[in-house]
Image (cartoon, helix red, strand yellow):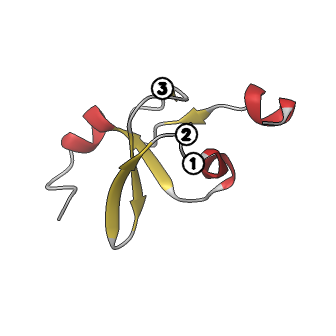
Amino acid sequence: MSDARRTRRMHCQSCSDVIGMYEPIVLVDPPEFRETSLAAEPELLDSAAACLHRACATDLDDPYG
């Protein structure tokens, strides 16, 4: 992983807190919601898709449809 990626941070689009590299996240990529992590998919740092902490996603109305 490049040094630039290591220093960049992704923030939850619900609570604005930093999302950890190995933390489970919910990727909101309409019409789908799916779980992943930045460790599994580091390219998400460059993505426009909405990412949420798992706990924040459970606050949504039925995020898994």
Q: Is residue 13 left or right of residue 3?
A: left
Q: CA distance from mark 2 to mark 3?
A: 15 Å
56 or 4, nearer to the observer: 4
Quadrant containing the N terminus is top right
Give the residue at mark 2.
38
Give the residue at mark 3.
17
Percent x, y for residue 46?
Answer: 69, 52
Q: Residue at x 66, y 51 (%)?
A: 43
Q: From what the image shows, is residue 51 above or below residue 55?
A: below
**Amino acid type indicated by mark 1:** Glu
- The disc placed on residue 21 is none
Badge 3 element: loop
Badge 2 element: loop
Q: From what the image shows, is residue 48 above or below residue 37?
A: below
21 or 46, nearer to the observer: 21
Q: Is residue 15 left or right of residue 64?
A: right
Residue 4's image quarter? Answer: top right
Q: Are marks 3 and 1 in contact (CB under 8 Å)?
A: no
Give the residue at mark 1.
41
Percent x, y for residue 19?
Answer: 50, 30
